Image (cartoon, rainbow, N blue to C red):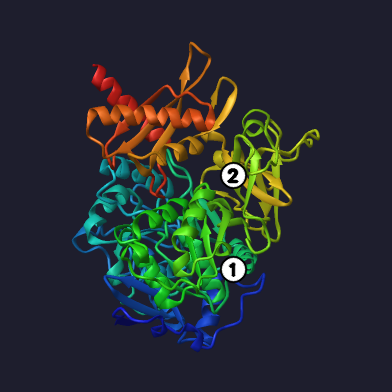
Amino acid sequence: MTVVTLAPGPAAAWAPHALEADRPAQPDVAATLLDRLARHAHRTPDKPCLIHHQDERYSVLTFADVQALSERVAGTLSRAVAGAPAHAAGAHATGAQVTGAHAQAPGGAPASRVVLLFLKHHPVQLPAYLGAMMAGLIPSFMAFPTPKQDPVLYWKSHAALIRRIRPAAIVTYPEIAGDLEALCAEFGTRVLLIDELATGDPEGLPGPLPGPGDTALLQHSSGTTGLKKGVELTFGQIEAQAAAYAPAIGLGPESTVVSWLPYYHDMGLFTAFLIPLTVGAAVVSMDAFAWVGRPASLFELIERFRATHCWLPNFAFRHLVNTVAREEAGGRRYELGSIEAFVSCSEPVKSASLRDFAKAFAGFGIRPEQLTACYAMAETGFAVAQSDPARHEAVRFYAAEPLRTSGRAVSVAPDHPGARALVSNGPPLDGVEIRILAPGVAPGGAAAPVQEGALVGEIAVRGSIVFSGYYEDQAATAAALSDGWYRTGDIGFLDGGELFISGRIKDVIIVHGRNYYAHDIEEIVSAEAGVVPGRAVAVGVANEEAGSEDVIVLAETRTADEAERKALKRAIKRAIFDGLELTVRSVHLVGPGWLTKTSSGKISRSENLARYRAETITARG
C-alpha cells in the first residue's frame, strides 16, 4: 500500500491508462469475485484498485496489495473463529472460545458464519470484507453510529439484528467494541479491531475458496422501519450482476469510479466495490461526511483522477447545485469532461434535478447525455434497468389524472395541463425480466385488459440477478418471491420497453379515491422558499369520519419569525393544491435536523410521523 499526499494540481497528475489493464470481465459460470481478484493481481499487479481519500491524503492499493491484505485478513479471521489467538478487542475481549465455522456459543446457540463490519471510512475496509469471503465467512457492512442518530434507537435495532444473526465475528473500532461485545456475549462472537486485522499472515486459510453457488454476502440496506432484512446473495449472483450491468454502463478495466457512497448501502457496495473489482476498474473512495461538508471535493477528485463514472442519489445532484459556486460567481472551474456517466439512483429520479445539474455545471463540461438513471435494489444485488440518453429519450410526459385514478400511463405533450415529467430508467438489463402487475394480480396471473396507455402497477423482477431469500426469514422470503419473481413494492410501467417509476405501494396516500405519491408532495414542498431543500416528508393519516386519508406535511425551516412561519405554511398548502389539486390537512414546521433519516440516508416517514404524534400528544397534555 502506498500512501501519498497530492497537492492541488492539474488533472495530468493521474494517468490510469498508462498501466496495462486486464480485459473486460465476460460471463463465466465458474468465476467468482475472488477468482477475478486473483486474476487481476496476477496479470496487472501494479494497477491501482482502490485509491482511498481522507484528510487530503491518498492511500493507493494496487490489485496485488488488495489480494495480499485480503489473504492476511482471511488468516486472522480463520484463526479467530476457530478459537486460536487473534487480535481481539484488547480489554474488551470476551475470551469466548469459538470452535469451527458454526461455533458453539456459551449459551448453546450455534453462531453463524456471518461477519458484521461496523466501520467508518477506512483503507482496509474492503480487504477486510474480501478476507472474510476468503475465510469461508459471510460479510455484511453495517452503518457506524453517528452523532445525529438517536443512540437508543440505533443500539435497540442492532441488538435485535445481532440476536437473529448470531455473528461469528465483528470487526470494528475500540470506541464501540465494548458495546458490541455486550450485545453478543451469549453467542461467543469474537470482536476484532480493524487496525489490527491485517497485521497477521495468510496461514490458516480453511481450504478451497467458495464457489458460485455459495453465499457471498448479506446486504442490510433494505427497509426503512423495524428490523432490517438481510438480503442473501451468492457469488454467482454477484457475477451475473456485474456481467449484465458493466456493459450497459460502459464500465471496464480502463474506467475510474469516484464515489462517496457508504458501503453498507447496495449502491455503494456494488458500484464502488464489487462491480469495479470484477471488471478491473479503479475506484477513488472518499468519506461521505467529508463530501457533505465540502461538496466540491467530489468535483476535485473527478478532475484529478479523470473519473469516468459516478453514481449519486437524487438529493446529491440538488446538494451540488445548491452549494458549489459557479465560475461566474467567483468559484473555480472544474474540468469534468472525462465523465462518461453520472448515474442517478436509489431515490426517485427527478427530471428537474438532472436538468438543473446540467444547466448549472455546463461550464464544467457537463452535458445532458452524461446524466443517466438506474433502477436498482438490494434484492437484485443492484441494477435492474439502466438508461442511455444517447439512444433513448431521457424524460417523457404523462397525464397526471390517469396515473392517479385509473392506473394508466398516457403519454402527452410537455405543455399538456397537468403533465407529469418522468425520467426513463431504460430497458431491463440482459437476462432480466420485468412484469407490471395489475392490482390484485400475482406475477403468473392473467394479463390486464387492453386500455389506453401503459398499465401502471407493481413491478416484479425475475432473472439470475435476483436473490434467493432473506437470511433466516422464511416468512419475508415467501411474501417477496413467487415462482422466481420478486415483487419490488415499487409502482411503475413499461413504455416502449423502457421502465418508468411512479411511486411505491406503501408511499401512496389515497385521498377520496385518488392516489397521491408522497414523494411528489415532498418535491413541491422542498422547492418552496423557506424550506430546507430535501427536508420534507408527507404522510397519510386515517380520517375515520371521512373514510379516507388526510395528508400531513412535516418540513424543516430555518425561519423563526412567527408571522413568516404562518405565511410559509400557507404558501406550502397553496403550492400543493396548485400542483396536485390536493388539500392537505396540516403543515407542521420543524427546525433543521428534526427529521429522522434511515441508515441509508432516506427520510423515514413512519418514524417521523410517530415523533410528530408523540410531540403533539405531549403538547396537548
Quadrant of residue 563 in the image?
A: top left
Horizontal side of residue 237 vs 61, given as left or right: right
Residue 614 spot, x, y in % from top left: 30, 25
Q: Which mark is residue 567?
A: none
Callout 2: few (<14), some (14-19), or many (20+) C-alpha neighbours within 10 Å?
A: some
Where is mark 2, residue-wise? Answer: 421
Marks 1 and 2, how far apart at CA = 45 Å
**Quick one: quadrant of the N terminus?**
bottom left
Closer to the chain start, of discs 1 and 2, is: 1
Quadrant of the image containing the C terminus: top left
Q: Are marks 1 and 2 in contact (CB under 8 Å)?
A: no
Q: Describe residue 388's horizontal placement relative to residue 185 as left or right.
A: right
Residue type at the position of mark 1: Gly
| Residue 140 at x, y percent in the picture | 43, 58
Hey, what amino acid is under mark 2? Answer: Ala
Where disc 2 sits, the SS reads strand
Circle nearer the viewer, 1 or 2: 2
x, y percent for residue 133: 47, 67
